[in-house]
Image: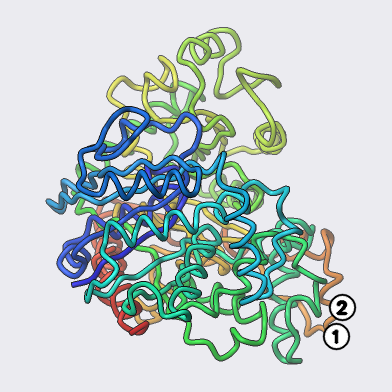
Amino acid sequence: MSIVVHVTHEAIQKMGGIGAVLEGLLTTHTYNEAIERTFLVGPLFNGADLNALDTVLYHAAEGIYKTPYADELSKIEKTHHVELIYGQRRFENKDQQVNTITDVLLVNVANSNEDLTSQFKWQLYEHFGIDSTRYESEWEYEEYIRLAEPAYTALQTLIGEETDTPVYIISHEFMGMPLALKTQIERKNGNGSANMRTVFYAHEVATIRPIVEGHPGHDVRFYNALEEAKSQGKLVRDVFGDPFWYFKHALIDKAHLCDTIFAVGDLVVDELRFLAHPFEAYPINLVYNGIPAFELSLEDKLESKSRLQKYARTLLDYRPDYVFTHVTRLVKSKGLWRDLQVLTHLDSLLASNDKTAVLFILSTEIATGRPHENIHEMESEYGWPVHHKIGYPDLVGGEIELNNGVSAFNLQSKAIKVVFVNQFGWSQAACGTRMPTEMEFMDIRRGSDAEFGQSIYEPFGIAQVEPLSFGAICVVSNVCGCCGFIQRATDNREVPNVVIADYTKLNSVPKSLNEVVNIGLAERTQIEVENSRDIAAKLLGRLPRKPRDIEEMIKEGYEIASRMSWEVVVKDYFLPGLKQTL
């Protein structure tokens, strides 16, 4: 049995990808059989909802002292000038009948002891060469530096300094690196538990994301440059300049000092090895993300699809033969324009086959959702979500650019229309009275014929393949980390349930690294136009024609998803990775 400490900004509640990973890991039977105790450690944010905790055991400001460690925790608060909240959070998976309790430690570092923080920063420089003075204006950096020492001492208190049980400090991304490095310092000095081990969990490579997103050549440029640079023994700074301007890089650059590294995708491994020479021979463990595997009947699939078709008829005055979906965050990395490029080719193909389709894009920049009254007003005033207006409560930020693309597509398309639903949620309460009363969020997953997810940077991509077990065709780009897991789960067979779009394949062999680095918008657009034509043709060939085809897709999708479940991830990847640290 072991103790695992997850350091993350999502310690108290699920907000994004890391939260989804924690939920996946912690609600498996295999994890709970192997891990005796789990801690979630993170900063206490302003306005944090403490109701997300199942129990609060220590919170001095509220007069809560329900733990025998209250005196020691109080001393830590006074020494480091921080506020600690210690409690427990429940994780539950009703389908798998898993119900587990984790310990949660939150640290408010807003007024932390400057002298002790400065001493710790000096230790980071002395031991690891990290110059914190460059990043002190970045609160995200400062916050996790300040958290490290009080969190370490509190963990020593709560776990016990001399425990014989292996304790794994897992840094989810850059956030836990200061605590991991603090652990390394104490181990060097012969302090603390000799059984404490450190893990860097790479959900992405923060250094690489801005390089891919920030240049019009995107993935076409970067991944070809990566391959060319590898053949020449060059690293990221040799090709793209000094990355130490970025505070996240300063921390993840030291991840090779951890006892092991987890990477969620094959390309994440390549990207890590591209950072610095110590990573090149480092034993990086692939720990893919898991995906849900639900058994679904043909009848339930068709019922969900019927609801989506009914909604489309209400909005567009026709009942589409096929329903396509893209459920995603509205960020550049998701490559939403590629959906429209594929549909442009697919539109003429469907029209010639006398078939119709709709694509529902569910994405928004308003993460909390728009108020219901605003949705109803927009719906009745100008026909939202088919029609939109710029400005809140409707289009804001990146929603405007996406809607421009959708509108341009809809003006010229014959067989396919795109409906951009810029709202959080998928129900009549969230999306207005024209949505069927019986509609629920899972309908957009169960009822989809194809889910798009052709990202330009996607370390794994859980959302892209979530509908796999529901018989949907998952259209993903080859830079998505899930592709490697799919290939392992299918023994490299080409299966009808997955279409992999390769937008990184160049038309000719580059003459030099410099030529690749200079790939820009024109070259990328040409490749996307050509490749999206092939993807459209491949998708058309795989779309089900009759109920028996759908049944086969459901069966095959469930079998693949079952081999990509969180139980498989924990058993075959996560736990063996932890053992390697010992």
Q: Is residue 534 left or right of residue 517?
A: left
Q: Around disc 1, counting alpha carbons within 10 Å, would you say few (fewer than 14), some (14 to 19), or many (20 or more)?
A: few
Q: Around disc 2, counting alpha carbons within 10 Å, would you say few (fewer than 14), some (14 to 19), or many (20 or more)?
A: few
**Residue at horizontal 46 percent and vertical 67 percent from the top:** 201
Please tell me whether mark 2 sits on a helix, a strand or a loop.
helix
**Residue at horizontal 33 percent and vertical 35 percent from the top:** 59
Quarter-of-image position of residue 135: bottom right
From the top left corner, tell me how far across and down residue 359 is, in percent.
51, 40
Q: Foreground residue, 502 or 455?
A: 455
Please tell me whether mark 1 sits on a helix, a strand or a loop.
loop
**Quarter the N terminus occupies:** bottom left
Quarter-of-image position of residue 430: top left
For badge 2, the amino acid type reads Glu
From the top left corner, tell me how far across and down residue 372 is, in percent.
45, 15
Q: Which residue is mark 1?
A: 512
Q: Which residue is mark 2?
A: 515
Is residue 383 in sight in this rendering? yes
Label pair 2/1, CB-CB below 8 angstroms:
yes
Q: Is residue 327 left or right of residue 138?
A: left
From the top left corner, tell me how far across and down residue 196 is, in percent.
35, 74
In this picture, is 299 found above or below 316?
below
**Residue at horizontal 48 percent and vertical 10 percent from the top:** 373
From the top left corner, tell me how far across and down residue 147 is, in percent.
50, 52
Q: Say which mark, if any, is on residue 57.
A: none
Q: Is residue 370 left or right of residue 531?
A: left
Q: Foreground residue, 556 or 104?
A: 104
For badge 1, the amino acid type reads Ser
In this picture, is 417 found above or below 41?
above
